[in-house]
């Protein structure tokens, strides 16, 4: 495909956000009679699903302590449900299984899910939780669980298949997807410094509007746009915190136990919900009985035919490096630095065995030969920034929350078409200076 001289809407990144925005914008422009998919080109330096969207576990859930996140996720679940086949979406549900230290937070989530009509069930007390879990899985054995939130909606999608499904839908609307084109910088002009052209490794492309969905490369693009590396944040008590780094990296730890995915079904032979367990019960090695941790830990898992086994992960770790020094490329399984190690495998497999007897003694089947895990680029408060910079650059920086956020591209498309979104409003960049921050939960994960 020849490189265009100019394009009306240039989208950077063929991951979930770039593709979803391109598809929904094409539909919106057509609906409004103001354009079509032929006005949109998606550019990716590598390929469709080359970033986080292509390696994500693919879990889709509502379980968030922050009301604004929950409302946004409910909207995204509707989009997943609108075309489960194209999106390779499995609506098996999701369970948040927690210890007493998280009970109050999760109870709030349940109450607010009821208020927004998001179907879920909440079980409280150790004995009732055990009975409920054994009713689903006769071999359930996790200790110290005092609340279970069972979301009846949500589930997971097959990571790459969903991206190709989205790409097909976008292309059917006339959107062009150009891979192997790397954005190296932006040409700017005018008083507000709006972007007038993309500087790519294949040449200059004039553009009217830019959408950025660059996932782990958010910091790189942010630097190209010459946006601030450090910002000021107003804390809850009104105190200003200056010189806070805009971006930080966390490494996501995920892997696959290479057993028959069918070994993990519910008692009545159905596909189980995605399981997420947080616990402060001591975690012992399934190999030699030694103590792995007596502090808070968490894991999630699901049977997945795409990955060929039981796939899931544990809490990520923060990368203690200046964000500009972090090697994002090569990304994912190709990275020499940011893939899981033996400690993760030992902990995650032992935690599976802690939860369900069927996983005892299965660590030997872990897929050692398939490197897994990858970087996520996080904002200062670890929540997304959806906002317009330099007058005409819509930045979708999801702070690594976002495979599940299929609906964000739809809302962004509506905003580009001139319709302000109430759901996106709590995620503006100005919230840092104004102190309009999201509440913080007691989960061990930075994204709950
Ligand atoms: C291991 C792991 C597991 C995860 N699991 C889940 C999960 O279960 N559920 C969930 O909701 N979220 C999950 N996430 C988070 C989620 O995957 C990301 O938040 C989301 O995929 C980001 O989507 P994106 O479209 O912004 O970016 P990406 O999918 O990363 O796409 C960005 C694209 O931009 C391209 N690009 C970058 N720079 C340039 C450039 N200069 N020029 C041209 N193209 C460029 C890249 O090649 C890439 O294809 C996980 C993340 C990781 C790393």
Image (cartoon, rainbow, N blue to C red):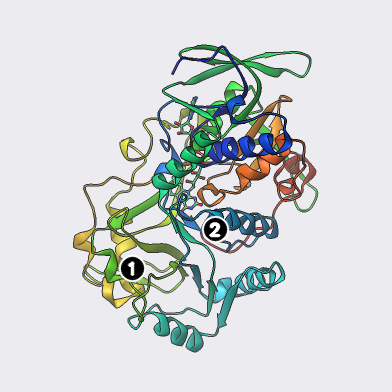
The relative height of residue 254 versus residue 226 in the rendered view (above or below) is below
Residue at the spot 42% in from the left edge and 74% down from the top edge: 281
> Mark 2: which secondary structure?
helix
Q: Position of residue 295 (x, y in %)?
A: 45, 66
User: In the image, is 445 to the left or to the right of 424?
Assistant: left
For disc 2, the marked residue is 81
> Mark 1: which secondary structure?
helix
Classify the position of the N terminus by image quarter: top left
Of pointers 1 and 2, the one earlier in the residue sequence:
2
Q: Position of residue 426 (x, y in %)?
A: 73, 48
User: In the image, is 349 to the left or to the right of 389?
Assistant: left
User: Which one is in front, 408 or 330?
Assistant: 408
Residue at the spot 41% in from the left edge and 35% down from the top edge: 50
**Does the image show residue 231?**
yes
Q: Quadrant of residue 222?
A: top right
Q: Quadrant of residue 375?
A: top left
For disc 1, the marked residue is 352
Closest to the camera, between mark 1 and mark 2, is 2
Q: Residue furthest left?
A: 364
Q: Position of residue 48 (x, y in %)?
A: 43, 34
- Label 1 crowd bin: few (<14), some (14–19), many (20+), radius 10 Å: many
Classify the position of the C terminus by image quarter: bottom right
């Amino acid at each position: 495909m020849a490189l265009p001289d100019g394009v009306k809407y240039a989208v950077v990144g063929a991951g979930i956000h770039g593709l979803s925005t391109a598809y929904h914008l094409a539909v919106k422009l057509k609906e409004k009679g103001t354009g079509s998919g032929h006005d949109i080109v998606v550019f990716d330096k590598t390929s469709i699903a080359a970033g986080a969207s292509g390696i994500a576990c693919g879990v889709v859930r509502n379980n968030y302590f922050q009301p604004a996140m929950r409302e946004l996720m409910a909207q995204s679940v509707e989009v997943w449900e609108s075309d489960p086949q194209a999106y390779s979406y499995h609506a098996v549900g999701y369970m948040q299984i927690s210890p007493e230290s998280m009970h109050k937070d999760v109870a709030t989530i349940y109450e607010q899910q009821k208020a927004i009509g998001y179907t879920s069930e909440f079980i409280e007390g150790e004995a009732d939780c055990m009975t409920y879990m054994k009713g689903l899985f006769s071999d359930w054995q996790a200790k110290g669980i005092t609340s279970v939130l069972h979301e009846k909606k949500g589930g997971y999608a097959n990571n790459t298949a969903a991206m190709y499904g989205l790409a097909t839908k976008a292309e059917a609307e006339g959107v062009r997807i150009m891979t192997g084109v790397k954005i190296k910088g932006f040409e700017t002009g005018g008083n507000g410094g709006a972007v007038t052209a993309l500087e790519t490794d294949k040449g200059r492309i004039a553009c009217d509007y830019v959408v950025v969905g660059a996932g782990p490369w958010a910091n790189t693009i942010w630097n190209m746009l010459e946006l601030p590396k450090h910002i000021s944040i107003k804390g809850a008590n009104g105190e200003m915190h200056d010189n806070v780094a805009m971006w930080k990296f966390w490494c996501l730890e995920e892997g696959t136990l290479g057993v028959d995915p069918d070994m993990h079904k519910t008692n009545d032979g159905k596909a189980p919900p995605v399981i997420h367990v947080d616990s402060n019960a001591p975690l012992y090695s399934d190999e030699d009985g030694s103590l792995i941790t007596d502090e808070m830990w968490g894991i999630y898992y699901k049977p997945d035919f795409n990955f060929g086994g039981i796939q899931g992960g544990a809490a990520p770790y923060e990368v203690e490096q200046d964000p500009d020094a972090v090697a994002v490329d090569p990304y994912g399984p190709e990275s020499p630095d940011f893939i899981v190690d033996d400690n993760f495998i030992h902990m995650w497999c032992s935690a599976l065995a802690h939860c369900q007897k069927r996983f005892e003694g299965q660590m030997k089947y872990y897929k050692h030969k398939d490197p897994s895990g990858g970087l996520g680029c996080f904002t200062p408060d670890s929540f997304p920034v959806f906002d317009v910079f330099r007058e005409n650059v819509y930045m979708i920086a999801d702070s690594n929350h976002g495979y599940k956020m299929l609906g964000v591209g739809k809302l962004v498309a509506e905003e580009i078409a001139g319709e302000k979104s109430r759901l996106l409003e709590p995620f503006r960049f100005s919230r840092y200076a104004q102190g309009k921050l999201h509440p913080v939960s007691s989960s061990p994960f930075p994204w709950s």
